[in-house]
Image (cartoon, coloured by chain):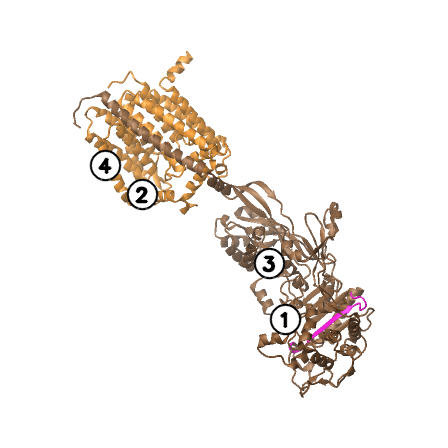
Chain colours: A brown, B orange
Amino acid sequence: MSSLRLINPELEFLRYRRRMEIAGVGAALLFLLLFGRFVWLQLVQYDHYQSLAENNRISLLPAPPTRGVIYDRQNMVLAQNFSAHTLEITPSETGEKLDAVIDRLAEIVEIEPGDRKRFRKMLAESKNFESIPIRNLLTEEEAARFAVNRYRFPGVEVSARQFRQYPMGPGFAHVVGYIGRIGEKDKTRLEEEGLYANYKGSDHIGKLGIEARYERWLHGRTGIEKVETDSGGHAVRLLSRTEPVAGYNIYLHLDARLQQVAERVFGDYRGALVALDPRNGAVLALMSKPGFDPNLFVDGIDTLTWRELNDSPDRPLINRALRAIYPPGSTIKPFMGLAGLELGLRRPGDSIVDAGYFSLPGSSHRYRDWKKEGHGVVDLKKSIAQSCDTYYYQLAHQMGIERMADFLGKFGFGARTGVDLDGELAGLMPTPTWKQKRFKQPWWPGETVIAGIGQGYMLATPMQLAMATMALANGGVLYQPQLIRAWREPISGRVAYAAPRRVGEIPLKPAHLAVIRQAMIEVMLPGGTAARSGAGAPYGIGGKTGTSQVIGIKQGARYDEKRIAARHRDHALFVAFAPAEAPTIVVAVMVENGGSGSGTAAPIARKVLDYWLLGKLPTVYEPEEPADAPIPEEAEDSGRAEADVVVAIPAEDLTQ
Amino acid sequence: MIRRLLLRVVAHLDGPLMAMLALLLLVSVATVFSASGENVGRVIDHLVNMSVALTAMLLISHVPPQRLMQFAPPAYVLGLLLLLAVALFGIVVNGSRRWLDLGITRIQPSELMRLAVPMMLAWYLQCKQEILNWRHFAVAFALLAAPLAFIAEQPDLGTTLLIGASGFYVLFLGGLSWKVIGGFAVAAGAALPLAWNTLLHDYQRQRVLTLIDPASDPLGAGYHIIQSTIAVGSGGVVGKGWMAGTQTHLDFLPERTTDFIFAVFSEEFGLIGNLFLLLLYAVIIWRGLWLAASAPSLFGRLLSGAIMFTFFTYAFVNMGMVSGILPVVGVPLPLVSYGGTSMLTVLLGFGIVMSAAKHKKLVKT
């Protein structure tokens, strides 16, 4: 291009037009590109972005249900809820260091080191935008004081939460159990069972006892609030709400007053007491002593208290009714006697002469009776009434361990009773096969001999003793011990009753059973081992004492209670049914290191029976005011009353 | 009488273009109303800005191009001096030195350069029209580069690029040799890695990186792009309806009334609305280019053409940014975004385009 040229407007204009057209086409193409982008975003990818926008917009907030209340058979409250204020911090919204916030809060409400510790723990487990309680159970005054200072604390709020409370104290901890914070394990389990969604708004879950066993019923169904939220996560409006459905109220067969009586009459002893209704297997009392305060566990027990409980030699955390396994001792004798009759090894009138010991043929080893000089002429009744050991050494030897295990097994020994609580132990009904497997040793005849009086390998829980005694009391029917009596559906208000679970019937000759029962009645009469405990009872009692050895006694030595340290004393056992003619209650008592069954266990049982059958309160027992519990008919709107239809539902459905 | 007066006042306006601009401004008012969350005060401010800008447009449409041309060198020099003053005494806002504090008010000299630069270049090419050769283009380049250097240093990447673009359009329409254009394209491509490492600031680099992968920083730099893309996409074909955009009304969209107003529009009016808006822009630009081509002077043609293509560039860059195909640069959607300065600059531009086309008789070549 020359530096000098003719001005040619025409040409120059054409060039301008061409340049403009080129740029115009370029612009049009770029707009087309934009349009393509819009088509991609708004047509092709619409669903994707639509759902992203919805996720932005809509939050689902869980509305936790109210947990079901647990009542005893008299509608006394065993576990209840109450509403209280908590002070909660949403860490993402405070805008400053949490410690500083808490320090400033501590100037307004009391915050203890334990509160801080719990807060830290929960903070570590939580998501950032969840609110975490720093203080529970604010007093009205504290709540008011915070309200005045609220503006100084962004991200801190007072909110009403439901708390669980166990008004009946330590004696009920093992039965009612407790709820605790949902831990990682619970979470995993809930996820596996596909239930985790229902726990979105819940902090707690049943950990022990009825609270754990009937968790699914007690918890209720979590409601959902669908809210529109802005970018700051604040709810702008409620789109829809599915109401939470409260958990089922649960009514137990347990009688709280009977339980309290049992607790008191134990005094300072450790042990367990189980009372069953032999007509249906209802658990009337299930007591393990010592207990503990379940309220400690609800919001996380502190390490020190936990260690104290866990390391205590009294082992308060063990539910002895289901987990204390001891040799059943002489309480086994009625069952052995019955076995002798049923197997045709003994007739009621058959007698032996007891010289105070038994020796196996061809052996000089003496298996001693507890009475050094022997009981003289002993028939079946006397063998039970006076708890003659020699009679049963002989009988056991004759019967052999196989037949013995077979017969006793029918009464539930060596198997879990199936009571509706977790953690039950099965005890042990030994057999030669078991011993071979366990110790790689053959069964020795001497082991059969001592098994005849409930010593040696055999182990049973108080619950098993109660269940077996129940079969003696009701003519051979085995009911699975059951705590749950009824439950109330929260929506319909219907109360459904749990049907008794009949798990077996032992074919027994009534005449044989009558002999045994009569013998057990005689235990409580003058001349019987528990005559003192039977004295003056206006109703008939059938009982059997027992002792369970804690330490072995050397051949030839005598057991001297006074010389033995308290923790090495024998465990005292006692089983009973009453009234003897038509029993309505069966009791099994185990007193750890109680010494003898007749001395400690039987008097305890008598007081429990007196309360149950006569309404007689033991002198040591001070009745508490009945808790303010609504009875089922009054708990709901009056219009619902006629909906109370009795529906028998097998109890196994409860736990599914 | 009044009618004739009125006709005289609007004599230099272009009817079809004004009609389309009015339509666009109507869209703007409706969208700002929704984007501001029914903030009537904001809409009134917007209308005031609009009135001021329209008045300015009306006034400038009466200024003949050759008079305007006389203003080009002083305006350019003043702008350059002010930019120098900014570099020396400017105040820093959000990490950029863009403002000059005059005591009573603050001004942003780079805004002045949006029109002053293309005017200056068009003036220069007009002056050298008869002897135009590559040396003059070299001088023109220097005239363009000087203010750009200042603005880039502030730093203000968006304005640099857009003023650079407007200057380039003048040169391009003025007949800049393809060889030079090609040479520059190659040089720019080669210099890109160097520029990436030396010229760009961290936050600018971050913006580009964020564009490539917004999810890498969803709460930080990526947030804008993610949320605006969601807003656009979730609008679907027919949109969520005016005032019913959830991204908009629930506060998920940043800068809703200004740079990201297109996301609001797009969410509420959907693909159909977007198509309408694109077509409206296209028709406005087409009409503007047609007017530019009909301008009798080279100055008028070059300036008008550059103004229209710059207008296009603003629209394209903004919509591309909001829909996630261009990095986030602070460019408003012309004539739709809330904001007085942008409104004023753009409508002044349209006033110049119409003036250049309508003042025919007085121009000699």
Give the label on residue A314, or none.
1
Q: CA distance from mark 3 to mark 1?
A: 23 Å
Q: Which residue is mark 3?
A: A180
Question: In the structure shown, which secondary structural element does the residue marked by tag 4 occupy?
Answer: helix
Q: Quick one: B303 or A281, which is closer to the camera?
A: A281
Q: Position of residue B184 (x, y in %)?
A: 24, 36
Eye-nearest disc, 3 or 2: 3
Image mark 2: chain? B
Q: Quadrant of the N terminus of chain B?
A: top left
Say which amino acid is labelled 3: Gly
Q: Is residue B60 left or right of residue A169?
A: left
> Where, by quadrant of the figure, is residue A32 drawn?
top left
Q: Residue at x 50, y 34 (%)?
A: B240
Label 4 Cα crowd, 10 Å radius (few <14 / some 14-19 / many 20+): few
Q: Quick one: A223 or A18, which is closer to the camera?
A: A18
Q: Position of residue B214 (x, y in %)?
A: 40, 44
Can marks 4 and 3 be said to lie on one chain?
A: no
Q: Residue at x 40, y 36 (%)?
A: A37
Q: Which residue is mark 2?
A: B200
Q: CA distance from mark 3 to mark 2?
A: 57 Å
In the rendered structure, which disc, 4 or 2, sits on the residue that comes first in sequence? 4
Q: CA distance from mark 2 to mark 1?
A: 75 Å
Q: Residue at x 76, y 75 (%)?
A: A341
Q: CA distance from mark 4 to mark 1?
A: 94 Å
Can marks 3 and 2 be said to lie on one chain?
A: no
Label 3 Cα crowd, 10 Å radius (few <14 / some 14-19 / many 20+): many
Q: Is residue B8 left or right of residue A287?
A: left
Label 1 Cα crowd, 10 Å radius (few <14 / some 14-19 / many 20+): some
Q: Quick one: B169 or B56, which is closer to the camera?
A: B169
The answer to whether B203 is drawn above or below residue B335 in the figure is below
Q: Which residue is mark 4?
A: B183
